[in-house]
Image (cartoon, grey):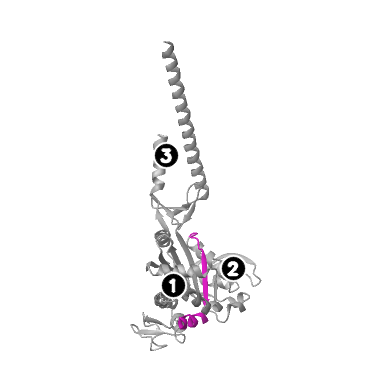
């Protein structure tokens, strides 16, 4: 009987210990769940009215969209490239009057794990939130306007690039941008001549009246003399001519990239020499190592090329491009996020343990 009593007491002690552990675990789970709910509630923000982004201490940046949860792909490095409608050496720029506007805007996303590239083209007339400054540089707050003029509120150098970087990131619901590179019009001729010319197939008839060499379907070798016309010209009397020009810019960029790949495969110092040839016309936060990595990744091909979805319209004074917010959300998810199945497993596990 005495041993039986000791065994019973020992068993009670074990049960009590197990019960305490269960209570502690339950308290931890409930506390974590409460903290998750509280943080989620405080940090939720709409992504085009349908998707919700939440950040917690234990969760990476996530989006909830149409019943599914997506996690930002943290293997991505995103770089903003801009073509600016100014000339001369950028070191001479000092203020807004020198800055110019960003006539060509595209984001290159490199997956460091797969070494693949995605490219997102952003129409220059996209209507979005930008920050406005007076000539002395004082902020006048936010307004909705053409994204390309955000560049004009800087100094034509780092400030302009940083403003564009922020505006593009905000337009894409906070997608991080790790670096930028802008180049003015004088850089087009220098770049094209340095690579020995760029062979393109003319994609449309938009330049035939200006230069008969640019007949739709023709194969033309662009040089320093005619590359700027192909890349920059647009008929400002025609509505949405900027969108037509953007298609030519895509053609040029793809052909230029192919030529750079060929040259780099034969010359280890090609990237450094290329940058030296255009540095007077360029503002960048990216080192030669980044350009080299992008060039290497481009050899695997561009896995996805998209344009910010929307519709071009004639505004009161200028053309406007109005973004389709729902389609933009889906595009952001497809380009920058991955489905987070682990999230559901963790939540289901919590519910199971709670029950």
Q: Is residue 175 magenta?
A: yes
- Please tell me whether mark 2 or mark 3 is closer to you in this view: 3
- Quadrant housing the N terminus: top left
147 up-or-down from 192: above or below:
above
Say which element carries label 3: helix
| Badge count | 3
Q: Residue at x 45, y 18 (%)?
A: 9
Query: What residue is disc 2 on?
Result: 132
Element on which disc 1 rests: strand
**Is residue 243 depicted above or below 57 in this figure?**
below
Toward the bottom, the furthest residue is 212
Q: Nearer the viewer, residue 50 or 13?
A: 13
Marks 2 and 1, Cα distance to the nearest angstrom? 23 Å
Indicate which disc residue 350 carries.
Answer: 3
Residue extent of the magenta highlight:
173-194
- Residue at the location (40% across, 69% down)? 298
| Residue 220 is covered by the magenta coloring | no
Visible in this render: residue 188?
yes
Give the quadrant of the C terminus.
Answer: top left
**Cα distance, mark 2 to mark 3?**
48 Å
The quadrant where residue 98 appears: bottom right
Farthest residue to the top: give it. 1
User: Which residue is under mark 1?
Assistant: 313
The span from disc 3 to disc 1 (Cα, nearest Å) is: 50 Å
Where is residue 327? Give x, y as percent: 40, 62
For this orientation, the residue located farthest to the left is 217
Q: Are marks 2 and 1 in contact (CB under 8 Å)?
A: no
């Amino acid at each position: 009987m005495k041993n039986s009593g000791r065994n019973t007491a020992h068993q009670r002690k074990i049960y009590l210990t197990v019960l305490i552990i269960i209570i502690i675990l339950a308290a931890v789970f409930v506390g974590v769940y409460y903290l998750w709910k509280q943080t989620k509630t405080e940090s939720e923000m709409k992504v085009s009215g349908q998707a919700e982004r939440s950040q917690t201490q234990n969760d990476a940046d996530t989006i909830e969209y149409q019943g599914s949860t997506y996690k930002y792909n943290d293997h991505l490095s995103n770089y903003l490239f801009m073509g600016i409608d100014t000339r001369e050496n950028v070191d001479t720029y000092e203020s807004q009057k020198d800055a110019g506007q960003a006539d060509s805007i595209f984001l290159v996303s490199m997956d460091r794990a797969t070494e693949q590239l995605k490219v997102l083209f952003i129409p220059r007339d996209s209507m979005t939130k930008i920050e406005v400054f007076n000539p002395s540089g004082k902020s006048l707050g936010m307004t909705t306007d053409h994204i390309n003029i955000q560049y004009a509120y800087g100094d034509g150098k780092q400030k302009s690039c940083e403003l564009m970087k922020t505006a593009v990131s905000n337009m894409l619901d906070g997608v991080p941008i790790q670096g930028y590179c802008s180049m003015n019009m004088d850089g087009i001729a220098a770049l094209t001549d340095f690579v020995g010319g760029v062979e393109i197939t003319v994609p449309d008839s938009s330049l035939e009246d200006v230069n008969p060499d640019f007949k739709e379907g023709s194969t033309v070798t662009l040089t320093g003399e005619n590359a700027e016309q192909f890349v920059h010209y647009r008929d400002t009397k025609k509505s949405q001519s900027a969108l037509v020009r953007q298609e030519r810019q895509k053609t040029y960029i793809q052909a230029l990239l192919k030529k750079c790949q060929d040259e780099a495969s034969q010359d280890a110092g090609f990237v450094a020499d290329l940058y030296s040839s255009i540095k007077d016309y360029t503002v960048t936060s990216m080192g030669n190592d980044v350009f080299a990595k992008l060039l290497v990744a481009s050899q695997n091909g561009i896995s996805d090329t998209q344009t910010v979805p929307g519709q071009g319209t004639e505004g009161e004074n200028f053309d406007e491009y109005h973004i389709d917010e729902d389609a933009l959300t889906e595009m952001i998810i497809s380009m920058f996020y991955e489905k987070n199945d682990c999230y559901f497993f963790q939540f289901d596990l919590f519910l199971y343990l709670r029950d």
